[in-house]
Image (cartoon, rainbow, N blue to C red):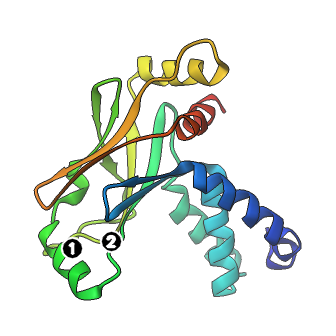
Amino acid sequence: MGLADYETIRERFRDRIIAEKKLRRVQVGANVCALFENRDTVLLQIQEMLRTERITRPAAVEHEINTYSEILPGDDQLSCTVMIEIPNTVERDAFLRAAVGFEGHVWLVADGERIKAIPTAHGGELEDRTTAVHYLKFDLPKALADALRASGSGSMPRPKVELEVDHPAYAARAALSDATVAELSEDLRS
């Protein structure tokens, strides 16, 4: 949307997406948080970037759309933004150096099956450190994607889904709530 049109709906749209994000957020240990993305969460990021940076040139708008669209999940795929959240800058910097290769140690675990995260082209690793934000996707096996879709319609029980980080510098695992799994089921159905 153009900036003027967006301003007319911004408050209602942001409130709705912020409420939706609460269902999509998963805390993995003390210092890692994951947010499962969908079309609306990405659209909010694009609209807010355009608004904050006052971007109006068509080519610049298209660039933002293309950049953030890399985060969108594809068919039979889940996408999440993983954030390393350490408030103390000295501690965070030390951790980011110790956690080189972090992206290669994030897994989705569904009914015991481990699915390795795939980093997007949107970045995440530097030569001597990792970054605090990682954009990851999970290619779901067809049977799991179908089971999640079916659980969303109520025709099958929901699979047990967890996020796991098994990096030597950080290891944690968190179960996704029923509400989060329901959101992901809906994503796969739409």
Which residue is tagged 2?
132
Among the 4 quarters of the image, the one containing residue 87? bottom left
**In the image, what residue occupies the spot 51% across and 23% down?**
158
Is 139 rendered above or below residue 173?
A: above
| Disc sitting over residue 88 in the figure | none
Q: Is residue 12 visible?
A: yes
Q: Is residue 55 visible?
A: no
- Reading the image, the residue beneath label 1 is 96
Pinpoint residue 18: horizontal percent, then vertical percent: 66, 61
Judge from the rendering whether residue 161 lies leftward or rightward of residue 72; answer left or right.
Answer: left
Count numbered badges in the picture: 2
Q: Residues within 10 Å of mark 1 (few under 14, many from 20)?
A: many
Question: From the viewer's perspective, is 161 left or right of 99?
Answer: right
Callout 1, which amino acid? Leu
The x, y position of residue 178, in whole percent, is 54, 34
In this rendering, position of residue 145 left or right of residue 112: right
Do tag 1 and tag 2 residues touch (Cβ < 8 Å)?
A: yes
Please name whichever residue, 146 or 54, is drawn nearer the observer in this view of the structure: 146
Picture quadrant of residue 184 = top right
Q: State the residue at coordinates (63%, 68%).
A: 46
Position of 97 relative to 17 (above/below): below
Instruction: Give the structural element (helix, strand or loop) at label 1.
Output: helix
